[in-house]
Image: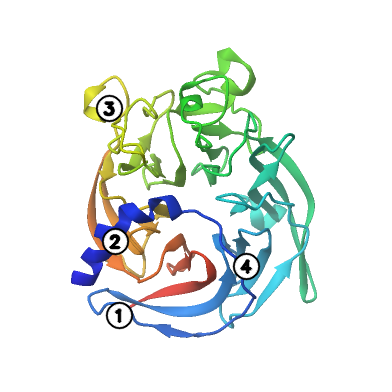
Amino acid sequence: MKRQNLILMLSPLLVPLASCGATAAGDSTIQGSTDFAEANPFTAREVAKLDEPWALALLPDGKALVTEKMGKLKLVDLASGAVSEVSGAPQVAYAGQGGFGDVVLSPDFVRDGLVYLTWAEAGDGDTRGAAMGRGKLVREGGSARIEGLEVIWRQSPKVTGRGHYAHRIVFSPDGQHLFLTSGDRQKMTPAQDLSVTLGKVLRLTRDGKPAPGNPFADKGGVSAEIWSYGHRNPLGMAFDGSGRLWDLEHGPAGGDELNLVQPGKNYGWPLVSNGDHYDGRAIARHASRPDLAAPALSWNPVIAPGGMIVCKCTKFAAWRGNALIAALGAQGLVRVSLDGETAREAERFNMEHRMRGIAEGANGSLWMIEDGPGGRLLELLPR
């Protein structure tokens, strides 16, 4: 417990590093088991080592796709740990927090084979922005490729800087709509500007177009893509079992947030936060602006969150319906109890590494990836 508390006390110092780039390391695969604190209700089977893994998608046949921040897409056999490269990945702008982002399967993947990808894309004049594309995963013999990759959405506008792309994808429970986070790109004020997509959660069709019925559709242009606004750097997003959408975002110096995302609402950034600027300047607190949507839960000190799921948890029955968060700064797994529209932190488990992403398999298996060079893909197993 003392060690865990020390990590959490230091977590504000880790915030600027939460998504930073790092030097590349060679590919390797190993298998074994990892024992964390005895208090944790799980052990972990180490499946493979990867190079700055950012996101993972579980395939129906016991394999997984994993994005590596430098721009490679890897196919991992979850039983053997064998790792191979998938060709046809996009060219990414790798620097700072930018690079390869999310990987998500089409709701009809078994039929159409489509994979959705996000990444940081270079523009003119030292500018960059997030992009989203989709293509078909084709496997022949021992090789795999993304065929016909087509860009279907671009962050608007591209700006200078190398942070806060967000670019997290989740499909609605009925599979008809694609929700996408778009970070503020460290420019802050665009999060309040409905004429740009920075600092927003977007609701799109599966083709990347504005979804009918969006709250600002009458404004036209990119405003028609916007579902909610006033977001900073939303790196996690998931639907709960009742169809409510939750997002998880990094605060500044303090004030990480779990938000219940609802159409047309303003979540306040940069007008309010439960944290302060990195230089010590104060930011008005959420409580001072009841007209703005407040987080369901905030952290101070921060946990520096990565990805999240809402768990069906057939293998961890006590966690069923809870949000499970891969925590970078808190270096572990954070469990949040969801009760309707309210949330509270229930537990956190020290894993001694910065955790970047989490996924749940159809059989209830939980999988996590560590951040950074040599980041491991782990299967969590009940004790």
Label 4 Cα crowd, 10 Å radius (few <14 / some 14-19 / many 20+) = some
Q: Which mark is residue 319?
A: 2
The amino acid on which the numbered mark 3 sits, given as a three-letter code, is: Ala
Give the Cα separation between the discs numbered 4 and 3.
40 Å
Q: Residue furthest bottom?
A: 32
Q: What element carries label 1?
A: loop
Q: Quadrant of residue 265?
A: top left
Dot 3 corresponds to which residue? Answer: 284
The amino acid on which the numbered mark 1 sits, given as a three-letter code, is: Arg
Give the Cα separation between the discs numbered 1 and 3.
44 Å
Discs 3/2, front: 3
Discs 1/3, front: 3
Dot 4 corresponds to which residue? Answer: 24
Give the Cα separation between the discs numbered 1 and 2.
14 Å
Quick check: 381 above or below 197?
Answer: below
Q: Residue 248 carries which label?
A: none
Q: Which residue shows up at 45% across the image and 74% down it? A: 379
Whether tag 1 and tag 2 are in contact, CB under 8 A, the answer is no
